[in-house]
Amino acid sequence: MKFFIDTANLEQIKEAQDLGILDGVTTNPSLMAKEGISGAEAIKQHYKTICEIVDGDISAEVLSTTYEEMIKEGEELAAIHPNIVVKIPMIKDGVKALKYFSDKGIKTNCTLIFSAGQALLAAKAGATYVSPFLGRLDDISTDGLNLIEEIRTIYNNYMYDTEILAASIRSPMHIINCAKIGADVITSPLPSILALLKHPLTDLGLAQFVADAKKLG
Ligand code: G3P
């Protein structure tokens, strides 16, 4: 399973990269705004900087919602760096844009996936990744993991190449359950990734080993 970090924060991206387990980065307009990035040139420069830190797929989301505008914007984003993946919303014009980019060999990530039908359409249109939003489904009392399972079954049935990129991760258990189901990728905030490290018995055991090591001379 690939690990992406879901942030536009350069310090957190560097920290995950330093850990040696990072395969890519996802961003969205809300995450960019959180970092105070604004204006087309500043946004492009920020993506370029992320691409220089991480050697993996970097999702850059279009801000427009019509087919023509998404094509123009997506082509500009794809020109920033070969690792840029154009992130497109699951709307009618978005499906058309996915097909356009797929035919041109440009990688895409179809975002805002909340149903198996949407994931099926995105795969038919040739999306490289689909991003089902686990946490936001859980927020409305709907089992987000169930959606990941449904998409896994459908993609396996027809051997779609589209990768399931589980998004809107809120906890280390989300990551573990996605791995059990067979999601291809998880994209997570840094704290949930770091939480995978922790176990009190590891800390206790290490403290004992360090104490005993001192007796060894
Ligand atoms: O990047 C898309 C997704 O991961 C957003 O997560 O926490 O805003 O629902 P969240």
Image (cartoon, rainbow, N blue to C red):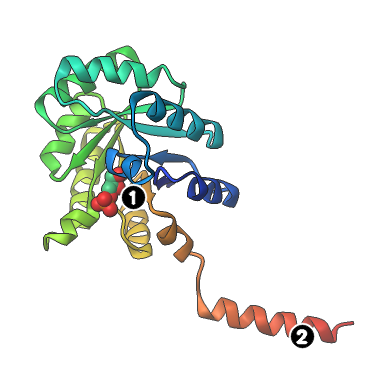
**Is 99 rendered above or below residue 137?**
above
Q: Does residue 7 appear to the left or right of 65 in the view shown?
A: right
First in sequence: mark 2 or mark 1?
A: 1
Residue at horizontal 15%, vertical 45%? 114
Q: Nearer the viewer, mark 2 or mark 1?
A: 2
Residue sitting nearer the eye, 152 or 207? 207
| SS label for mark 2 | helix
* Few, some or many residues within 10 Å of mark 2 (<14, 14–19, 20+): few
Reading the image, the residue beneath label 2 is 212
Question: What amino acid is labelled 2 in the image?
Answer: Asp
In the rendered image, residue 184, in percent from the top left (x then y), is placed at 36, 43
Image position of 192 (left or right of 104): right
Quarter the C terminus occupies? bottom right
Residue shown at 17% from the left, 26% from the top: 94
Q: Residue at x 32, y 29 (%)?
A: 128
* Residue 67 visible in the picture: yes
As measured in the structure, the alpha-carbon distance from the residue carrying label 2 to the one carrying label 1 is 41 Å
Instruction: Determine the residue located farthest toward the right in the rendered image.
Output: 217
Residue 153: image location, x then y, percent? 21, 45
Q: Position of residue 174 (x, y in %)?
A: 32, 60
Asked if one can make out residue 167 in the rendered structure from this viewpoint, the answer is no
Task: List x then y, in percent, for residue 90.
Answer: 16, 33
Q: Is residue 149 left or right of residue 41?
A: left
Label of residue 182 in the image:
1
